[in-house]
Amino acid sequence: MTKHSSTSATTEENDIDMNETFYLRLTANKVSTANLSVEITSPSLNNAKCELTNRTATVTSGTAINFGPMRCTTSGNHVFTFALKEGSNAIGTAVTKTINVGTISVGTLQVIAPTSAVVNTPVSITVRTIGTNDLPITNYASNFFVIISGDDLAEKPEGAQKMDGQSEKVIPGLKFNTPGTVKITIR
């Protein structure tokens, strides 16, 4: 009996845009002397929604297998299956990886702020974009506003703030002029 094991596939990125180049990485540990390979299949590869030139790789113990460069031309979930093979026979349990392309949207704008501040002493807050997949959005370019409730005299940036294609932005120089509890809202 041939002994083998494989682990889950990963991507280098979590938020993949349409037509963006990416790689899928798989680790397959080879325990035997048999010639083993890994084959990647997907309906998205068969119907030209995603492109990949080489769909088979030889397993070398302790080495990650990178499938790519890959590119998907349509948005949505693309499911890829990795099968470990000895010759032309599949062995073990296939591993699947779903890649979401071009459909991640902002779930929340998260505020990271100090738990306390001294009156009339500037503090900074960080605004972070979190996608519907609970990961940072790396290409967010929309405007947001800083709203402070509980201190009408607080100093804050006026007007729209822009994320400039980043996943987070530091807002320096907020000053609170009234002792007590304040609420910072990002909208």
Image: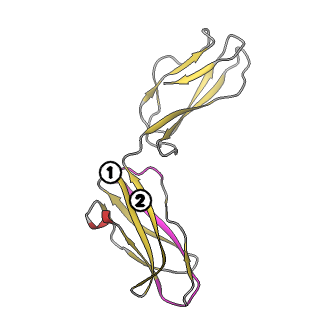
Disc 1 marks which residue?
75
Does the magenta segment cover residue 76? Answer: no
Q: Earlier in the sequence, mark 1 or mark 2?
A: 2
Q: Which residues are magenta?
A: 14-36
Query: Is disc 1 in contact with disc 2, using a CB cutoff of under 8 Å?
Result: no
Left or right: residue 75 versus residue 9 is: left
Q: Quadrant of the N terminus?
A: bottom right
Q: Where is residue 185 shown, x and y percent of the image?
A: 55, 23
Residue in the picture at 38% in, 64% down: 69
| Above/below status of 2 relative to 54 | below
Residue in the picture at 26% in, 63% down: 48
Q: Which mark is residue 22?
A: 2
User: Can residue 156 be seen from the camera position used here?
Assistant: no
Q: Closer to the camera, 131 or 177?
A: 131
Q: Splitting the image into 4 quarters, where does residue 37 fall?
A: bottom left
Separation of marks 1 and 2 at Cα, in angstroms: 14 Å
Where disc 1 sits, the SS reads: loop
Looking at the picture, which amino acid does disc 2 mark?
Phe
User: Can residue 60 be seen from the camera position used here?
Assistant: yes
Does the magenta segment cover residue 35? Answer: yes
Q: Closer to the camera, 160 or 73?
A: 73
